[in-house]
Image (cartoon, helix red, strand yellow):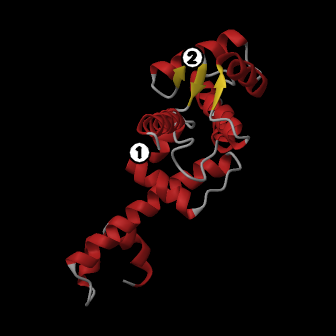
Amino acid sequence: FGNSTWEIVENNPERLLEVPMISDKILARFKQTMKENSIARELLKLTAKAGISLSGETLHALIARYGPDAEKELRNNPYEPCGAIAGYSFDRADALAISLGYPMDSDNRLVAAICKVLDDAAMSGHVCLPKDDLLAGLVKFTSCSSVKCADAIRKAFREKKLRGANNFIYMPKRYEQEASISQNVLRLILSGG
């Protein structure tokens, strides 16, 4: 194809079937790879503007989660993948959100910050926090008002991103783990074991 190669690759890849040894199967894989590379390029452009670099693994995880709408989804809510995708931290989401002009007290930011505060507590050995401690930690971490932070905690409960028991607040997975441990201990006590 000479000087037209890139034009054909990007705009008319079916012409690659004219090349010996290129089958329909190879062409289909090639087109899928080109599509994924295009999505990856858009994500990298978006995150680079915020000064964020993503590993190949994180990039592929974002594409796997959102497909061709990955860039649009991150623009819509840069905090959504926090905690769900390895390598996509609250700090990265926050940098992206700031570059996109999100307000520092947006509901999405505060809900993600709740998870960050609870994750930080877990790193210190706490699987949950008393409600008042979570609220105080969230206010301190985000510099937002206690009213706005309390609203975000209620929203996180409505969205099932938090669980509570006896005035303690958990991430759902940690709540389930604690409940399972309690059930197992009770089972052992009752069985005499």
The residue drawn where x is 45% and y is 59% is 38
Nearer-the-camera pick, 38 or 70: 70
Q: Position of residue 6 (x, y in %)?
A: 43, 73
Q: In this view, does 157 lie above or below 8?
A: above
Helix, strand or loop status at disc 1: helix
In the rendered image, which quarter contains the N terminus?
Answer: bottom left
Label drawn at residue 166: 2
Helix, strand or loop status at disc 2: loop
Q: Which amino acid does label 2 sit on?
A: Asn
Report the residue that reaches farthest toward the left: 24
Report the residue that reaches farthest toward the bottom: 20
Q: Mark 1 touching mark 2, by CB under 8 A?
A: no
Counting other residues with Cα less than 10 Å from the Cα at mark 2, is it few (<14), some (14-19), or many (20 or more)? Answer: few
Q: In which quarter of the image is residue 174?
A: top right
Q: Which of marks 1 and 2 is nearer the N terminus?
A: 1
Q: In this view, does 115 lie to the left or right of 72?
A: right
Q: In this view, does 139 lie above or below 47?
A: above
Nearer-the-camera pick, 136 or 126: 126
Nearer-the-camera pick, 6 or 43: 43
Q: Position of residue 165 (x, y in %)?
A: 53, 20
Q: Which amino acid does label 1 sit on?
A: Asp
Q: Position of residue 82 (x, y in %)?
A: 57, 41
Cα distance between the residues tagged 1 and 2: 41 Å
Label drawn at residue 69: 1
The residue drawn where x is 76% and y is 28% is 141
Q: Is residue 107 above or below residue 53?
A: above
Counting other residues with Cα less than 10 Å from the Cα at mark 1, is it few (<14), some (14-19), or many (20 or more)? Answer: some
